């Protein structure tokens, strides 16, 4: 690949790159007919966001999909967006924006390599196998040049992999650390096997929560693929609107997104619905990857004790064990997940600031923040619910 010219192009529609070219970089492992590792960077998921109007005009997420080509073949691509706000990212830079604008600068628009509204770690610099180094370098250089030439304040690559973070830092980007909570499958045969790894008190508490949750007067159904019917999305939309209104003010996804999901994403989705008298009263939507289950949205129309824990955390663990998945990623924030077997894990992002003085200030902030995150993860892990030895079991 030495000496081969790389061409960078920017597109406001995904179909200008094409599904075969995009997925050849985003999920080459799925060419065998299996699941992609990351369902969120697939053509079908990002196209659903675009076609449903969840991104695009009026949303503050303006597609600038980037592709790198050699001799007409796409070797790398990135889900790049021009952002006019900092919502739906989960790696918060509101304070940076305020400081930048107080100093007389214009922070927005900025460039963001991300999956909109999705705090899930995955590859952001998508490369065709064999072109990893050249593709990543081309995308980073292209995005920085795009920002610099257009006097854009900054570039952010959020929820990237640890390997991408390391590569990006070597290319001059500033790394940032944050955390979320993951459940890891240690080869458990069933949920009881998972409970056996926990301290006695935590084990008893989870069993109590599951009993209370399942005593809500109905049944819990786990649906995927063809078992998901059109009317289920009416309930999901109601749940999503309720949660979105409380958390973000305005829900990020449109109703049409769920209709498109029914047609093209059902095989990637696990719905966990609590139904009482034949009517859904609570539900959780998960995305299924090749190695992980990703918890995304929860909502309810009736409150029942512990039902949130059951639908979002315990049923997700049940599914992961049954399907042989490595982990459950339960989304952003929430230290209450710790007592339920979800331990803290580091997440990564990369940042570039056009203004050198502002970049220096951010670099100092990020160094202090990384130290704090590392310490927080260490402390939280020490308070985890798992057995540290057998002494407690004999007491």
Image (cartoon, grey):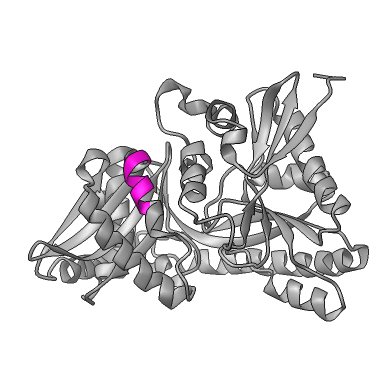
Locate residue 188, reporting x and y percent. Answer: 31, 44
Q: Is residue 290 magenta?
A: no
Of 234 and 120, which appears nearest the observer?
A: 234
Residue 301, by quadrant, is bottom left
Locate residue 77, reporting x and y percent. Answer: 66, 36
Q: What is the residue that sits farthest to the bottom in this orientation? A: 102
Q: Which residue is depicted at the point 23% across and 77% down?
A: 303
Left or right of 222 in this view: 331:
right
Q: Is residue 104 above or below residue 6?
A: below
Q: Which residue is depicted at the point 85% across and 72% down?
A: 105
Q: Is residue 283 above or below residue 76?
A: below
Q: Which residues are magenta?
A: 258-264
Q: Which residue is depicted at the point 50% across and 27% down?
A: 29
Locate residue 175, reporting x and y percent. Answer: 74, 55
The quadrant the N terminus occupies is top right
Q: What is the residue that sits farthest to the front in this orientation? A: 57
Left or right of 358 in this view: 243:
left
């Amino acid at each position: 690949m030495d000496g081969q010219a790389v061409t960078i192009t920017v597109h406001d529609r995904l179909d200008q790159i094409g599904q075969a070219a995009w997925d050849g970089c985003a999920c080459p492992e799925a060419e065998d007919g299996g699941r992609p590792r990351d369902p969120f960077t697939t053509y079908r998921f990002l196209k659903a966001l675009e076609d449903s109007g969840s991104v695009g005009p009026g949303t503050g997420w303006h597609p600038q999909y980037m592709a790198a080509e050699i001799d007409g073949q796409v070797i790398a691509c990135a889900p790049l967006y021009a952002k006019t706000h900092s919502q739906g990212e989960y790696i918060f830079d509101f304070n940076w924006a305020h400081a930048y604008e107080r100093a007389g600068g214009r922070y927005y628009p900025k460039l963001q390599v991300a999956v909109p509204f999705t705090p899930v770690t995955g590859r952001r610099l998508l490369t065709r196998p064999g072109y990893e180094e050249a593709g990543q370098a081309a995308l980073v250089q292209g995005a920085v040049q795009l920002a610099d030439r257009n006097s854009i304040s900054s570039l952010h690559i959020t929820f990237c992999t640890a390997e991408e973070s390391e590569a990006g830092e070597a290319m001059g980007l500033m790394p940032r650390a944050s955390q979320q909570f993951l459940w890891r499958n240690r080869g458990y045969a069933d949920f009881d096997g998972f409970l056996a790894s926990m301290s006695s008190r935590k084990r008893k508490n989870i069993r109590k929560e599951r009993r209370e949750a399942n005593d809500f007067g109905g049944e819990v159904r786990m649906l995927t693929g063809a078992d998901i019917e059109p009317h289920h999305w009416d309930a999901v939309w109601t749940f999503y609107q309720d949660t979105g209104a409380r958390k973000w003010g305005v829900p990020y996804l449109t109703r049409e997104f769920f209709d498109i999901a029914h047609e093209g994403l059902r095989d990637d989705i696990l719905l966990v619905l609590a139904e009482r008298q034949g009517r859904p009263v609570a539900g959780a939507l998960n995305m299924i990857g090749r190695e992980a289950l990703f918890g995304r949205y929860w909502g309810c129309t009736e409150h029942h004790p512990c039902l949130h824990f059951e639908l979002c955390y315990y049923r997700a663990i049940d599914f992961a064990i049954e399907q042989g998945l490595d982990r459950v990623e339960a989304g952003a924030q929430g230290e209450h997940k710790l007592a339920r077997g979800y331990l803290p894990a580091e997440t990564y992002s990369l940042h570039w600031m056009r203004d050198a003085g502002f970049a220096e200030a951010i670099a100092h902030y990020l160094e202090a923040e990384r130290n704090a995150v590392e310490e927080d993860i260490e402390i939280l892990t020490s308070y985890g619910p798992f057995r540290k030895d057998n002494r407690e079991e004999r007491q």
